[in-house]
Amino acid sequence: MAKFTCRLKLKVSTVFGLLLMPHLAAASGNIGQEPTLTVRPAPAAHFDEVFFRSKDVDGTEYAVVRPPYREVVSAVRNLSATEIAQVHRQTKADFHGDNVLSVVPRILVSSEFDGILKRGVDQRGRALRSFLQDYYRTGGHPRFVKDGRMEQGVLDSIVARNLEMQFRNRVNPEAITALYGPDVIRDANGVFRVVEDNTGFIGGMGDLELALKSLTENVKGLGGLAERKPIDFYKTLVERYRSRAVPAGGRLVIVQVPPYADFEDRRLLALMKRIGVDVVTPFTKATLEFDSDGAWIRAKKGAPRERVGFLFLNGEHWWLDMKNSLVDNVGLTEYAKLVADEIQENSKKRTFKSVAQKNREKRLFDVLSARDRETGFPDIENLKQVLTDLGEMEELGKWRSRSFPGLLDAVLEGKVASNYTPGTNFINDKEFYLSVPEMVRYYLGEEPILQNIKTYDPRMKDGSGRADLEFLARVERERERFVIKVVDGRGGKGIWVGPKVSEREFRVGLEAVRAEPGRYKIQEYTPLSVKGDEIVDIRVPADLPPRGRLFVSDIGWGRSLPLNGDGKVNLSATGRETTIIVRSAGQFCKDLFQPTPADMIFKIPN
């Protein structure tokens, strides 16, 4: 009850603080600080993470710093462009070139983080697990479909598109587990909404500790704000994994294979090693072995082997065990997609290519785009030939040689526990996302704490699968209102944010939708909340166990993007990582009953 009362006081006292504004303005004679490079009220269309707005007696509108941000504003308000650039250089070095850290952390109070985000992630994760268990108990024909909540054809196409149809009769529904970390934004009304679901191999897992450490070391005045220690999340996660070991008492091993997307994977390995987890890669002295009994580890060549009880899989299944028949064609297809991405990226450069090379590259795209509707795979023999012609099969062979034969079978047969069940990636699909709120109602009998963003299907409603040209014409006319998203993309690819891209760029997205309407969804443009001159999102990582509630992290992983960017909050050329700090709500009750300091009131730019 005390927690609820404090939260109520927080809301009431905010209003009371606004009433004190006219008195303060008359008394101080110094109301209305000028915005700075780092402290700047958000445009009215966005929810402002740092400020709330208030009017003086003469109708002048001001931006008032929210109490949890006052120390932050004091620390960063006068940073010069040179000092900001220096922080960016230093933090980029800390992250080994992966990311630049925003100089302004995102502050959330415990009442919203614990009361909304953590509860919402737990609820959504439990609903997803219930669906997956239902799906695998029924051989791919869940009650959710039979009761009319989703069409079987839609579900089959989602699973096939994500190359997971072959797992239908191989996954034990009672052993389903995953790391889960949905991406969440705050809309213009201050409501938290899920943008997409992420399970399995999720970004940000290795950065929670470094984000806080790098910020406090490089921006003076921010040390001591964090009340929650990121290392506690990792320690608890490891304890939970050890408790689920099969057999009990077996060693806990984190395993991954190169190539690594960035240095974050190495950071996570170092962190896990620091807290007592065994680390195995193709280049460590320690090695993994698999036999009919399960998984084993040898500390070095010639050392006795010890039983492994839990595998922390830091990578996708198709890279970790590329020789397994369930995923060998998945690995081939995913590798080909990486080659295609590299070709597209290089096409932006003015480099000479022979006609023969251009034809080989075109054939790769043609083969990848022609997929079998039932399995989701391209023509595998043609794909192998194209990759051979492009000179890629030798490199793919190196990848295969570094993987761990036997790993996937050991996990699927229950001979060793893991953090990430194969055959569960399809729930990250953006078409599947549409049904998750209804899954919360259906499986849990609860109303969703975290809602989706309103999303439209660009196909005709007659079941033909053809593009709804009338609707797409409206989307083109009202570009400022819509976002185009590919359903199976990651990392910001295949996304066109109407208000943030040119009319010409948006038409490229629309042509892609018209050509393959089943691969895209149209979302309503939702202005993201703003911190300074950046839009922000948050990912809250959690352990989704085979049963019971999720273990949800006490802090999150954040990203930000300049307001004038392309609207995609990812770590692209202009994206930044943002430190998340959760502060106890109770400490700000008394602050809100006091007059707002004059230096915490800013003018709103025209």
Image (cartoon, grey):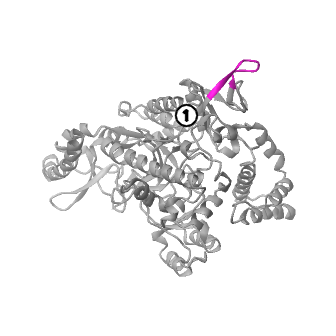
Residue 96 visible to the viewer: no
In this orientation, which residue lies closer to the viewer: 144 or 400? 144
Residue 177 place in picture, x, y as percent: 54, 43
Residue 288 place in picture, x, y as percent: 70, 29
Residue range highlighted in magenta? 297-308
Q: Secondary structure at mark 1?
A: helix
Residue 308 place in picture, x, y as percent: 63, 28
At x 30%, y 51%, the residue is 51
At x 68%, y 41%, the residue is 408
Q: Residue furthest top?
A: 303
In this orientation, which residue lies closer to the viewer: 331 or 6? 331
Q: What amino acid is at disc 1?
A: Asp
Q: Which residue is mark 1?
A: 94
Magenta stretch encompasses residue 227: no
Residue 229: quarter of image: top left
- Could you classify mark 1 by the number of other residues whose Cα lies within 10 Å: few (under 14), some (14-19), or many (20 or more)? some
Q: Residue furthest bottom?
A: 470
At x 54%, y 44%, the residue is 174
In this orientation, which residue lies closer to the viewer: 30 or 521? 521
